[in-house]
Amino acid sequence: MFEDLFSGAGLALAAQWGVSVLCGGMIGLERQLLGKAIGIRTSILICLGTQVFVSLGAGTGNPIADPTRVLGQVVTGVGFLGAGVILARGGAVTGVTSAAVVWILAAIGSMNGLGYPIRAVGLAFLTLFLLIGIRLLEKGFKRLRGGSHEPEEGSQADA
């Protein structure tokens, strides 16, 4: 059993897992530092779990296997997971970005599971750039802070 881990296929599998853990961990760290619902552990597990399911669907060796069917089911399941982090309180909807992060983590895991680890890492870095860069823009430009990102004066959210 353990000899399989040190074969060429075992090392490739370990590398895939490593990419999923790295990508999920980077994005999860950013979210956890902000105190968001989707943190390091959850992000790693979403990315890794998606990668495993997609790899299984793509690498069965069965000529009638269709990895797009697995992807379709992953998208459905991840949609429910993302919906679970969206909350409505006092007229404000929160957690939409966290739900979007769930989607992108699944996309990164899928990309990695289909054999595109470099693209998966690139997508993870692009995601981090967007999350951090847009937050910095919002801090620098008052007009970007409107809408649901900051409560309006006199609203219930101020109380």
Image (spheres, rainbow, N blue to C red):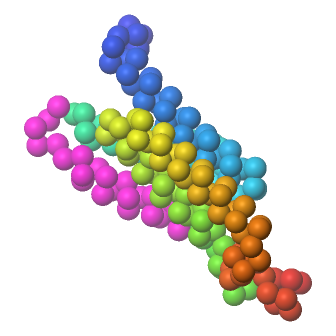
* Rendered view: 60 above or below 89: above
**Residue found at x 37% / y 44%:** 111
**Residue found at x 29% / y 50%:** 70
* Rendered view: 132 above or below 86: above
Position of 82 with respect to 94 (left or right) is left
Any part of residue 149 in sight: yes
Question: Looking at the image, which residue sits at the far front?
Answer: 141
**Residue found at x 37% / y 18%:** 10
| Image quarter of the N terminus | top left
* Rendered view: 105 above or below 49: below
Question: Looking at the image, which residue sits at the far right?
Answer: 159
Position of 79 with respect to 4 (left or right) is right
Stretch in magenta: 61-83
Residue 12 falls in which quadrant of the image?
top left
Residue 69 colored in magenta in the image: yes
**Residue found at x 77% / y 67%:** 139
Any part of residue 42 in sight: no
Instruction: Please state which of residues 72 and 118 is positioned toward the viewer in this rendering.
Output: 118
* Rendered view: 149 above or below 54: below
Residue 95 falls in which quadrant of the image?
bottom right
Residue 100 colored in magenta in the image: no
Measured as percent of width and height from the top left, residue 84 is found at 57, 66
| Image quarter of the C terminus | bottom right
Position of 126 with respect to 4 (left or right) is right
Instruction: Please state which of residues 115 and 119 is positioned toward the viewer in this rendering.
Output: 119
Secondary structure of the magenta portion, mostly? helix
Measured as percent of width and height from the top left, residue 152 is found at 79, 87
Position of 143 with respect to 96 (left or right) is right
Measured as percent of width and height from the top left, residue 129 is found at 60, 52
